[in-house]
Structures are given as structure tokens and as C-alpha cells.
Image (spheres, helix red, strand yellow):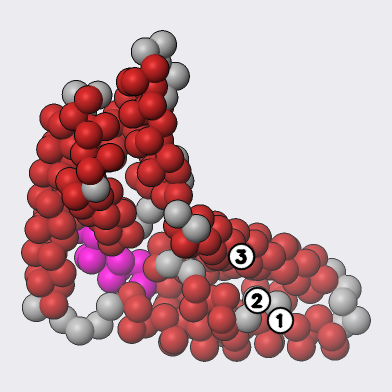
Amino acid sequence: MINKTTLRSLRNAEFIQFISDVLSILAKNEPQVLLVLAQFNALQAELATMEALFKKEEGSPLTDELIDLDSVRDNHIVGMATMVLAYSYHFDAALKTHGQTLQAHLAPYGSASEIARENYQSETAIINNLISDWNTKPELAAAIAALNLTDWKNLLQTANTSFNEKYLARTQQQGNAPTETVWSRRPLAMDAYDKLIKKLNAQGNVNDGADPWGKAINEVSALEENYTTLIANRKSASASKAAAKANT
């Protein structure tokens, strides 16, 4: 069964989706027949509370502005990276060299689409690092100028700065909001989940793994394995990226 370390590693949206998926599986297997109805209802109540908090946290007008600003900077980083890649194959040797210099500098951070898929804080930090290097490292600054990418760079910098300012404004807004959050409710949901799974396993043992207990346990186990794999893949990707950056 999934452990608490894995549950704690899930992002809020993933955590909520996981609990929702578990409840959906058990609903199809009839919790009253499984003799876990009380525990099912308790977890369902925790899910409803977290979903309401999540909608409230995500429903800020500033959140919509953040989404728009994030899309703008995503487009700029993807556009600039595409130009760099094209120049790295340019027929002109000098331009090709500049393109390859910038391409090599971008490589440790992953592809532009990977950068764009980073969480908000990580993407902000990556773009800040890129801009700083492009402004201060002579060979990179020369490449930016030679390939006429200064406008792209400036647009990206402006978009990233605007995004970060809006992100901080939303953080301040949330800081003035009620203290109960999705994160603060997660331990209660984890406890309700533990009780549900323990009761389900106990009923499965009493009935020697016969259906519907065996079927329900197998389906929840498969779901848990999928989420455990999601966490493992994310950790592996982060480790690989960190190693690549350390070697540059």
C-alpha cells in the first residue's frame, strides 16, 4: 500500500485527485457491501473540504492573471529556444557557433517545453538564471547580440518579472486569508485514508481475499502504484537535471 512519504510528496492537486480516485474505485465496488461505509464517508467529507479550499485558493482573480502571464513567458522561452536551435544549424559558420554556444547553455535546464512545465517558482528561478548569464557572460552576451535575440531576451525578462510580481502579490493576498488551507487539511485526509485502507484490508483478510474485497484492494493497489511511479519519475528527472547543471 502507498506510504505516507509518497502521499506527502504529492502536490495539492495530485493529492486531491488521488483521494478522489480512491473513492471512485470504492464507490463502484459499493462501500456498504465492502463494510467500509463509515470510513468511506469520513474520507469523502475530507475530500469535499479540501476541494472547496482548493477552489478558493485557485479562484483568486490574481490566479487568472498568473496563468496569463505564465503563458506569455512560456511562449517567449519556447520562441527564443526555437530560434537558438535553428541558428545552431545555420549555414553561416559564425552564426552556427553562436547558436551552438547558446544551445549548450540551455541544455542543462532541459528543453524549453520542460522549462515551461516547471512549477511557478522553479520556472521563475530558471529564467532569472538564464537572463543573468546572458547579461553577464561575455560569450553568451555576444551570441545574443550576434543572433539579434536581444528583443526576445528583453521580452522574456519583462514577462518573468511581471509574473513574479503578481505571484508575490497573490502570496501576500493568501497570507491575509484564513489560515486553513488544503495543506493544513492534508494530515486529516491522510488519517481518514489510513483508516479506510486498514478497514478494507482487514475485511479482505477476514474473507480470505474473496471478491468484492480482493477486487477493490487490487484496484486501489494499482492506483497507488501509478502515483508512486509518478513521484519516482519526478524525483529522477529532478536529480538528472541537477547533475547536468553541476557538470556545466
Depth check: 12 or 240 in front?
A: 240
Find out whether the residues at labels 2 and 1 contact each other: C-beta distance under 8 Å: no
162 vs 153, left or right, is left
Q: Is residue 113 visible from the viewing direction of this image?
A: no
Spatial CA distance of label 3 from label 1 is 26 Å
As measured in the structure, the alpha-carbon distance from the residue carrying label 2 to the one carrying label 1 is: 14 Å
Res. 175 image quadrant = bottom left
Magenta stretch: dominant SS? helix
Q: 151 or 124, which lies in front?
A: 151
Q: Residues within 10 Å of mark 1 (few under 14, many from 20)?
A: many
Q: Label 1 sits on what residue type?
A: Leu
Residue sitting at x 24%, y 24%? 147
Q: Nearer the viewer, residue 203 or 100?
A: 100
Question: Is disc 1 placed on a helix, strand or loop?
Answer: helix
Side (left or right) of 97 relative to 143 = right
Read off the magenta span. Answer: 50-60
Secondary structure beneath disc 3? helix
| Label annotation for residue 200 | 1
Count residues near mark 2 (Cα–Cα under 10 Å), then give few for <14, some for 14-19, many for 20+.
some
Residue drawn at point x = 33 percent, y = 75 percent: 182
Identified at 75% across, 71% down, the residue is 217
Is 52 part of what is drawn in magenta? yes
Give the answer, above or below, for where 82 lies relative to 64. Answer: above
**Quadrant position of residue 94:** top left
- Closer to the camera in the image, 191 or 42: 191
* Image quarter in which the C terminus is found: bottom left
| Residue wearing tag 2 | 2
- Residue 216 locus on image (x, y percent): 74, 68
| Callout 3 touching callout 1 (CB < 8 Å) | no
Q: Which residue is mark 3?
A: 232
The residue drawn where x is 10% and y is 72% is 172
